[in-house]
Image (tube, rainbow, N blue to C red):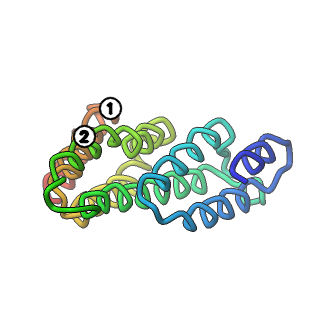
Amino acid sequence: MMTVGTAYMSIEDAPVKELMKDMMDMSRGVQHPIRGLFLRYFLSGQARDFLPTGDGDGPEGNLSDSINFVLTNFVEMNKLWVRLQHQGHSREREQRTRERKELQLLVGSNIVRLSQLVDLETYKSGILAPLLEQVVQCRDVLAQEYLLEVVTQVFPDEFHLHTLDQFLGA
């Protein structure tokens, strides 16, 4: 369904906003952490070129819809990624940590996509706060270290200079 949905998104005058919502809802049905991570990564990669960047209010969607789509996908992927630490026996903790480190790029890809979509004002007003909230709420050291590293690397230094107080306040 993801393949069909993203193919439909490529058609002119397609209801992209509704398609993004439907595909996000469908991906919620996969609760297995690894399968869910890969499905959401696939969805993100397939939809990347068809995300709306305009400012219209019609069914074709706009930049705000794209940002919400990527942010929601990030939050859900992060939850699945953090859940991986609780899978299996406690004696397999080191193996799970290695697996999680290998899968961290899937989660970080959403932050990279956000950095390609937003300008400084959007970053200050609607991106940084939800990202930092997710980092704090996940209460997982591996996730917090990685996510903060990705945020500092993918967004321009100018963005960080203007939001340093907000960043350090988290």
Vertical arrangement, residue 88 with respect to residue 120, above or below = below
The front one of 82 and 167 is: 82
Residue found at x 13% / y 57% = 91
Q: Residues within 10 Å of mark 1 (few under 14, many from 20)?
A: few
- Tell me where residue 135 appears, x and y as whole percent: 25, 57
Relative horizontal placement of residue 106, taking residue 52 as reference (left or right) = left
Q: What secondary structure is found at the residue carrying circle 1?
A: loop
**Numbered circles on residues, count:** 2
Vertical arrangement, residue 110 with respect to residue 29, above or below = above
Residue found at x 65% / y 63% = 21
The numbered disc on residue 156 is 1
- Tell me where residue 41 appears, x and y as whole percent: 51, 45
- Tell me where residue 123 appears, x and y as whole percent: 39, 48
Residue found at x 44% / y 44% = 110
- Tell me where residue 64 appears, x and y as whole percent: 57, 55
Q: What secondary structure is found at the residue carrying circle 2?
A: helix
* Location of residue 49 by image quarter: top right
The numbered disc on residue 85 is none
For the C terminus, the image quarter is: bottom left
The kind of residue on which mark 1 rests is Pro
The kind of residue on which mark 2 rests is His
For the N terminus, the image quarter is: bottom right
Cβ atoms under marks 1 and 2 closer than 8 Å: yes
* Location of residue 77 by image quarter: bottom left
The residue that mark 2 highlights is 160
* Location of residue 160 by image quarter: top left
Q: Residues within 10 Å of mark 2 (few under 14, many from 20)?
A: some
Task: Give the spatial CA distance, label 1 vs label 2.
Answer: 7 Å
Relative horizontal placement of residue 104, taking residue 48 as reference (left or right) = left
Residue found at x 15% / y 61% = 90
